Amino acid sequence: MQTSSVPLTVDDIVRLRRKKQTVQFGFYFILFILVLWSIQATVIDDTDWERIGSLADIGKSVSHFIGIDFALIPNLLGPTIETFMIACIGTILGLIICLPAMWFGALNVTPYKPITYPLARIAMTLSRSIHEIVWALIFVSAVGLGAFAGILAIAVRSLGFIAKMSAEAIENIDPKPVEAIRAMGGSNLQVMLYGIMPQVLPVILGIVIFEWEINIRRSAILGLVGAGGLGLVFFRQMNTFNYPGVTTVILAIFGLIVVGEITSHYSRKALN
Amino acid sequence: MAILEVSELRSRYSSRGPEILKGISFEVEEDDFFAIIGPSGAGKSTLIRCINRLIEPTSGSINLHGIDVLSLNATELRKMRRHIGMIFQEFNLIDRMSVMDNVLSGRLGYVGAIRSIFRTFNNHDIQRALELLERVGLQDHVDKRADQLSGGQRQRVGIARALMQEPNLLLLDEPTSALDPKISREVMQLIRTIATELKVPVLCNIHDVQLAKEFCNKIIGLQDGIKMFDGPTPSLDQSSLDEIYSMEVL
């Protein structure tokens, strides 16, 4: 074995490069085998090929969805408004339940660190780790079918994101105004209202508007599990094999989301 | 008669950390404009924050208007703090609020919870805030947001806010460090004029010795948490300055 102080020869370099290339080749080969195996296990074995039939059959199935069911349009207005309202009320309710969570979850203002901080962080993680459909299922079984279950699901699902981002905003404030209000004899409430809120309010509003936009998407599908709105119409059209009706609902959802995105874009711009 | 008596004040940030103040004693009289000078890291900011207990000293005593400051509970401390105006190096204004709201916030110590939520201050307070803003020369900027002002203007808002508290002691923490030399003089001049007018004693951290000599009648010099000099301004000569700043010369 040569010591490292001896300069490498051409042969050494060629040998090292070949070794590296062999390792690389081995890595990609194993990766390729793994991908093949996943396709075999999940797609080839697990698909009902007889049901799919030929390529033409696939085209035929998809073509069912082409077209718009104009008769359905008058019946969509109510559910569209309902979906929109579920998103709005759910976000507002979410913001209200977020207030204690962001207060407890920000290290610099949390009232009693060993208890309140972990409590808030667990609530935030729980909210995000459970899918909105699952939250909706839980609330449908708790308060019954309809928009109220959807609102609760949206509110609880919003907590994770709004509270986490807002708590981080509170942790990143400039401490100087806080010091000034302490120095003039301000109470903890006044420190919160005058030292912290003016700094974080625009940030929190931006986060809430962003979450509201996402909540429009979420509330559009909650009806699949009976929590009201456009999802419920979608579910009925699918069950009655009215494929143009399904397309119509999808277009309504698309329109609503575009409206939400535009509103969100301009209102967040206006904040700055 | 001494308004503020500080004796044997010691402070450290953590139980094992270094001692920042190593037994400081001094007295501020009724008509004093009192300067604390010394190199960076000497403990000037810590000392001034111990007076209103933004930093808790580890031992010693502070007596303000006959009240033992270190024995106060949280409520009593808040009551006492509302009579101590503080002016900061970086102004410490609430940037997103108007100049008027910033000045009015000086009354927060006197305002209850409900009224502070809705930012309702009584007409008398608003009248007084207007007068103070005129006094510091900002009558044309009442409705501007605080972050739209220049440095010198921002410090004037800070002065008006401190005066809004109707203070019986003013603490100044490097009030001119963020300002240019000309504005610095104007700001110091303004503070001295108003302090004399309202008969408020001033305790001022300042690293600019020239400014201290110009505006203050008494000076203490700190070095590494120890008082190296204490006396009326004329008695501060080159040798005592050399002693205070000896660490820096090295």
Image: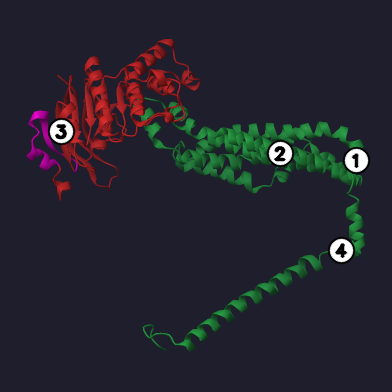
Residue type pointed to by label 4: Asp
- Chain A image colour: green
* Mark number, residue A216: 2
* Mark number, residue A48: 4
The reply to the same-chain question for discs 4 and 2 is yes
Instruction: Report if residue A7 lies within the magenta region.
Output: no
Q: CA distance from mark 1 to mark 2?
A: 23 Å
Q: Residue at x 47, y 29 (%)?
A: B96
Which of A205 and A225 lies nearest the eye of the viewer?
A205
* Mark number, residue B220: 3
Quarter of the N terminus of chain B within the rendering: top left
Q: CA distance from mark 4 to mark 3?
A: 90 Å
The chain carrying label 3 is B
User: Quadrant location of residue B159?
Assistant: top left
- The answer to whether residue A102 is left or right of residue B154 is right
Which of B186 and A56 lies nearest the eye of the viewer?
B186
Q: CA distance from mark 3 to mark 1?
A: 87 Å
The reply to the same-chain question for discs 4 and 1 is yes
Q: Position of residue B92 (x, y in %)?
A: 37, 31
Residue type pointed to by label 3: Ile
* Labels in figure, total: 4
Say which of marks 4 and 1 sits in front.
1
SS of the residue under disc 1: loop
Q: Is residue A143 positioned above or below A13 on the image?
A: above
Question: Crowding near pointer 3: few (<14 within 10 Å), some, many (20+)?
Answer: many
SS of the residue under disc 2: helix
